Amino acid sequence: MIFAKIDFINLLPFYIYVKKNISSSQTKAIINYKKSYPSKINQDFKKRRIDGAFISSIKSQKEKSTDIGIVAKKDVLSVLSIPGVYTKDIQSDTSNILARVLECEGKIIIGDKALKYYYENTNDDFIDLAQEWNNKYDLPFVFARLCFTKNGKDITKLANNFVRTKVRIPQYILKKYAKRANISTYEILDYLDKISYAIGYKERKSLKKFFKLSKNLD
């Protein structure tokens, strides 16, 4: 099974769970090998170069998916519109469309670099896109869904077990990512408290609204 990995902090709990609960050393090696950013993984998934991955919501509409994803109940901290001329983030698909749906001007930044920007700029001179969505529609925002092209039974089982498990992130891993992103381990844990993974009624309602509003914008 070829499984792609978005090596962002928001998916740390999932990949730690996978490492502990997949027995095949070959599969573990593949997960680590197939690292990339969201928009590139979207392309690889569309071309069926990978079997499973977290796919940007905007690209997941016609794909087979599980009931887990990357969800922000309110603010997310890692998807921002910062002052300047509207500029897409090349690593993203969903966030760029979300900014257009919300009519947010500015430069879009996502992932760990956005997280660093958030913690370094306490003057709130930016827009948190998930918070803006919640302010407008009183709904969580789903940035990605775990999708698959095959091995659906195994991936769905893995996903269902993951959301029922409280994952503890080892300190050495927290320190590694904190150093890489140039933020503190406390800030990582604070950020991860903003993220949830289960997709239920409200999340599906939010996806439906996002798909409707983004029609012809992709």
Image (cartoon, rainbow, N blue to C red):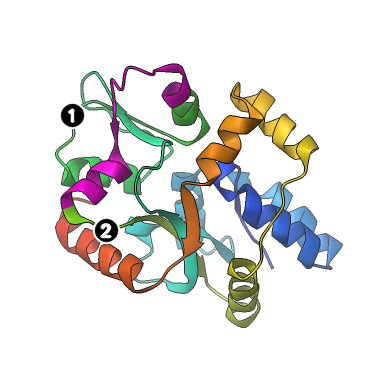
Q: Is residue 60 located in the magenta-colored stretch of the structure?
A: no
Vertical placement of 69 versus 151: above or below? Answer: above
Give the labeled residue for mark 2: 139
What secondary structure prevails in the magenta region?
helix
Vertical placement of 206 versus 121: above or below? Answer: below
Q: Residue at x 27, y 28 (%)?
A: 87
Disc on the earlier residue, 1 or 2: 1
186 displayed left or right of 27: left
Locate residue 81, reporting x and y percent: 29, 30
Magenta segment boundaries in residue numbering: 117-136
Give the labeled residue for mark 1: 105
User: Looking at the image, which is closer to me, 216 or 173?
Assistant: 173
Q: Amino acid at mark 1?
A: Glu
In front: label 1 or label 2: 2
49 displayed left or right of 88: right
Residue 47 visible in the current orientation: no
Locate residue 28, reporting x and y percent: 78, 58
SS at circle 2: loop
Question: Which quarter of the rendered picture does the N terminus lie within?
Answer: bottom right
Instruction: Give the crowd class for mark 2: few <14, some 14-19, many >=20 residues within 10 Å.
Output: many
User: Looking at the image, which is closer to me, 172 or 90?
Assistant: 172
Locate residue 27, reporting x and y percent: 77, 62
Q: Amino acid at mark 2?
A: Leu
Quadrant location of residue 7? Answer: top right
Instruction: Give the crowd class for mark 1: few <14, some 14-19, many >=20 residues within 10 Å.
Output: some
Q: Residue at x 52, y 32 (%)?
A: 112
Q: Residue at x 66, y 61 (%)?
A: 166
Residue 9 visible in the current orientation: yes
Vertical placement of 166 versus 102: above or below? Answer: below
Quadrant location of residue 210? Answer: bottom left
